[in-house]
Image (cartoon, grey):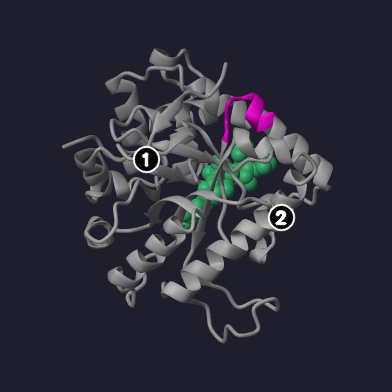
Amino acid sequence: MLSPRIKLSKLGPQFSRIVAGAWRMADWGWTPQQRLAWIKGCLELGVTTFDHADIYGGYQAEEQFGEALALEPGLRQHMQLVSKTGIALVTPNRPEHRIQHYNTSRQHIVVSAERSLRNLHSDHLDLLLIHRPSPLMDADEIAEAFHALHQAGKVRHFGVSNFTPRQFELVNSRFPLVTNQVEVSPLFLDTLHDGTLDQMQQLGIAPMAWSPLSGGRLFSDGARETRVREALSQLPSIGNAPADEAAYAWLLRHPARLLPITGSSRLDVIRKAVSACSLQMDEQDWFSVWVAATGHAVP
Ligand SMILES: NC(=O)c1ccc[n+]([C@@H]2O[C@H](COP(=O)([O-])OP(=O)(O)OC[C@H]3O[C@@H](n4cnc5c(N)ncnc54)[C@H](OP(=O)(O)O)[C@@H]3O)[C@@H](O)[C@H]2O)c1
């Protein structure tokens, strides 16, 4: 089975419903050939969209991905690349950063996107996101940077990540955004209830869901984690699928049309995310996970 495809907004882009995240790639300790095999494995599953950020792996992950892609440059035309900008980390390779901070200046956005392109061995990004909202962000300046990158053919679409509905509205009033990439999982329900996903549904924009397995915490032995995992693995409407597959099916059941971003190095886990796309969870099963996560019945 292949991942279905989905259009994020009426402007596009067309992505795979399951997106492969590259945040942890630098931790996998792989050779370029192993990274290439993983990329090809994702593409064979129809997982054609890859999620990056300038800062992943201490500013190293995009370069590692690009190094693998350079072994078979023809693969670029079969994939969509997402990157992010706006967080400045204190690391030896950024000596000018005295403190971890946010930078959403025009200069930073443009320079960071251009660097991502060089590192990824690509001539364009399909989507660029402002990684986190900054209290100092100037929506007009962000829009100017987006216009410049779009006009230069360097970035096709723009969005944000971890923005509240009001912050989304602010930037969207200056430049049309195509997604808000937010945390949502059976262990993290805030964005289900604080208006974030409602706004996406209202605007007809598909949100992207990061840490769909709570960064692996779903498999730890805490009391809440165990309760949620057990609830996930006992859902008759999806044939008692394993907990990880069920977690993806739970996210995919949401009407906002979430795109789960996998974080696993293992193609088997990514395959389960793809199989979850063909499962149809009923309301009662969905709520049994919600009840396990919140620890109480719906009022
Ligand atoms: N926009 C943002 O602010 C933001 C923030 C965080 C992440 N992201 C994006 O979202 C992507 C996914 O986030 P994530 O990596 O936290 O996703 P995740 O899928 O929730 O967590 C992945 C982690 O869980 C482990 N895992 C998966 N299945 C497991 C299992 N059955 N048992 C035990 N451990 C398991 C993986 O290890 P294995 O490799 O061994 O499977 C990996 O360490 C990132 O790559 C990044 O692209 C965005």
Q: Is residue 22 magenta?
A: no
Tell me which residue sits at (43%, 17%) in the image: 279
Quick one: quadrant of the C terminus? Answer: top left
- Give the amino acid type for the residue marked by disc 2 in the picture: Ala
Magenta-highlighted residues: 41-48
Question: Where's residue 277, x and y in %?
Answer: 46, 22
* Residue closest to the eye, 249 or 181: 181
The numbered mark, 1 or 2, whose residue comes first in the sequence reads 2
Residue 215 in view in this figure = no
Question: Where's residue 124, x and y in %?
Answer: 56, 51
* Label 2 Cα crowd, 10 Å radius (few <14 / some 14-19 / many 20+): some
Q: Secondary structure at mark 2?
A: helix
| Mark 1 to mark 2 CA distance (whole Å) | 31 Å
* Residue closest to the eye, 284 or 223: 284
Q: Residue furthest left?
A: 299
Question: Where's residue 268, x and y in %?
Answer: 66, 28
- Give the amino acid type for the residue marked by disc 1 in the picture: Ala
Count up the numbered dots.
Answer: 2
- Mark 1 highlights which residue? 293
Instruction: Check mark 1 vs ligand 1: CB closer than 8 Å? yes or no.
Output: no
Instruction: Check mark 2 vs ligand 1: CB closer than 8 Å? yes or no.
Output: no
**Are discs 1 and 2 less than 8 Å apart at CB?**
no
Residue 120 in view in this figure = yes
* Label 1 Cα crowd, 10 Å radius (few <14 / some 14-19 / many 20+): many
- Mark 2 highlights which residue? 26
Quick one: quadrant of the N terminus? Answer: top right
Q: Secondary structure at mark 1?
A: helix
In the image, which disc is placed on residue 195? none
Q: Residue furthest front?
A: 152
Tell me which residue sits at (68%, 40%) in the image: 265
